[in-house]
Image (cartoon, rainbow, N blue to C red):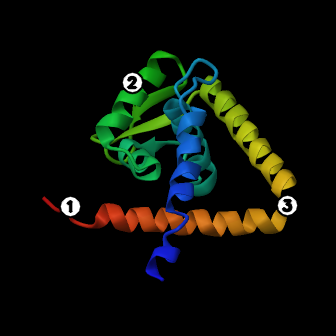
Amino acid sequence: MNEDKYQNVDGLMEAFQQFARMNWRKTTVWGLKPSEVRMLVSLKLGKEREGKKGQTVSDISKFLKVTSPTVTQMVNSLIAQGYVVRSADAQDRRISEITLTEKGEHLAEMAVTKSRNTFKGMIDYMGREKTDSLMELLNEVYDYFEELNDQPTES
């Protein structure tokens, strides 16, 4: 009886593998790495969400769920390309704020629009009810993997 419970494990693994094979997260967009585009978008959304013009490396790190050194590396690349600027915080000069330039703001807006249109297309394709169910299921799957990552590893 317990085997029936796990009968579809191979199908589930295959469904997840399809996304890895699609390579949809690895292609460059507008000459930037997907991670760099995500950072620009997070700066834009952070600005809209919190009303703050800039974000700290720590803020970005928490939002993107990556390490601060990873964020710093992306920031340096984006500064060199003219998408963001780094400036000292007005209250605490030890803290630097990362802010979108006009060029960065424009690209972030294009990325947000493209992303929203992609997901609107998915809603049109699947329907509202299935999309709502998918959203709930994906959030549960995410929670499961987060719990799994929080468990101590066995040696």
Residue under numbered circle 1: 153
Residue under numbered circle 2: 76
Q: Residue at x 32, y 46 (%)?
A: 92
- Camera-nearest label, 2 or 1: 1
- Camera-nearest label, 3 or 2: 3
Q: Position of residue 77 (x, y in %)?
A: 43, 21
Q: Residue at x 39, y 24 (%)?
A: 76
**Residue positioned most to the bottom:** 1
Label 1: how many residues lie within 10 Å, few (<14), some (14-19) or many (20+)?
few
Q: Amino acid at mark 1?
A: Thr
Q: Is residue 148 left or right of residue 16?
A: left
Q: Is residue 137 above or below residue 104?
A: below
Q: Amino acid at mark 2?
A: Asn
Which of the pair 10/80 is nearer the observer? 10
> Which callout, 3 or 1, points at the residue further toward the start of the chain?
3
Q: Residue at x 48, y 24 (%)?
A: 78
> Which callout, 2 or 1, points at the residue further toward the start of the chain?
2
Q: Give residue 109's quadrant in the image.
A: top right
Q: Is residue 90 above or below residue 151?
A: above
Residue under numbered circle 3: 127
**Residue positioned most to the left:** 155
Evaluate if marks 3 and 2 touch, with contact meaning CB atoms under 8 Å apart: no
Label 3: how many residues lie within 10 Å, few (<14), some (14-19) or many (20+)?
few
- Alpha carbons under labels 3 and 1: distance apart: 40 Å
